[in-house]
Image (cartoon, helix red, strand yellow):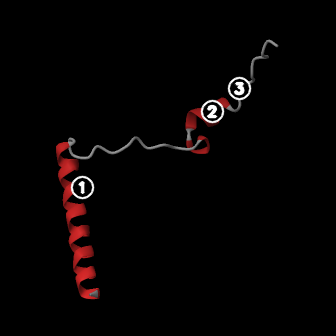
Amino acid sequence: MLKVLLVVALIAVVVWFLVRLTLRRLDGGGTSRPRVIGPDDDPDFLRNLDRPRKPEDD
């Protein structure tokens, strides 16, 4: 019984990878998401830290 369960699990994993690969190819090559950088890695953010802030109207 354990062997049957392992074979079914293995087939499910192979099918999952094949479906993911097929969907990526149909989607245009799996375009990657834009890289998100934190504010401490952003040069524009760090440059703006030195500028004085304008007083806000209350």
- Under mark 2, the amino acid is Arg
Q: Would residue 57 appear left or right of 29 to someone viewing this image?
A: right
Q: How far apart are marks 3 and 2 (CA)?
A: 8 Å
Which residue is depicted at the point 24% across and 55% down? 20
How many marks are shown on the rendered structure?
3
Q: Mark 1 or mark 3: which is in front?
A: 1
Which residue is depicted at the point 69% across and 32% down? 49
The reply to whether discs 1 and 3 touch (Cβ–Cβ < 8 Å) is no
Which residue is depicted at the point 26% across and 68% down? 13
Depth check, front residue: 29 or 8: 8
Q: Would residue 7 appear left or right of 51 to someone viewing this image?
A: left
Q: Distance between the residues labelled 1 and 3?
A: 48 Å
First-in-chain label (1 vs 3): 1
Q: Position of residue 4 (x, y in %)?
A: 23, 83
Q: How far apart are marks 1 and 2 (CA)?
A: 42 Å
Q: Would residue 13 appear left or right of 33 to someone viewing this image?
A: left
Q: In this view, does 22 lie above or below 27?
A: below
- Secondary structure type for disc 3: loop
* Location of residue 28 by image quarter: top left
Q: Position of residue 29 (x, y in %)?
A: 21, 46
The reply to whether discs 3 and 2 touch (Cβ–Cβ < 8 Å) is yes
Instruction: Name the quarter where the C terminus is drawn.
Output: top right
What residue does disc 3 label?
51
* Circle number at residue 20: 1
- Under mark 3, the amino acid is Arg
What residue does disc 2 label?
47
- Secondary structure type for disc 1: helix
* Location of residue 1 by image quarter: bottom left
Which residue is depicted at the point 43% across and 44% down? 35
Density class for disc 2 (Cα within 10 Å; few <14, some 14-19, many ≥20) is few
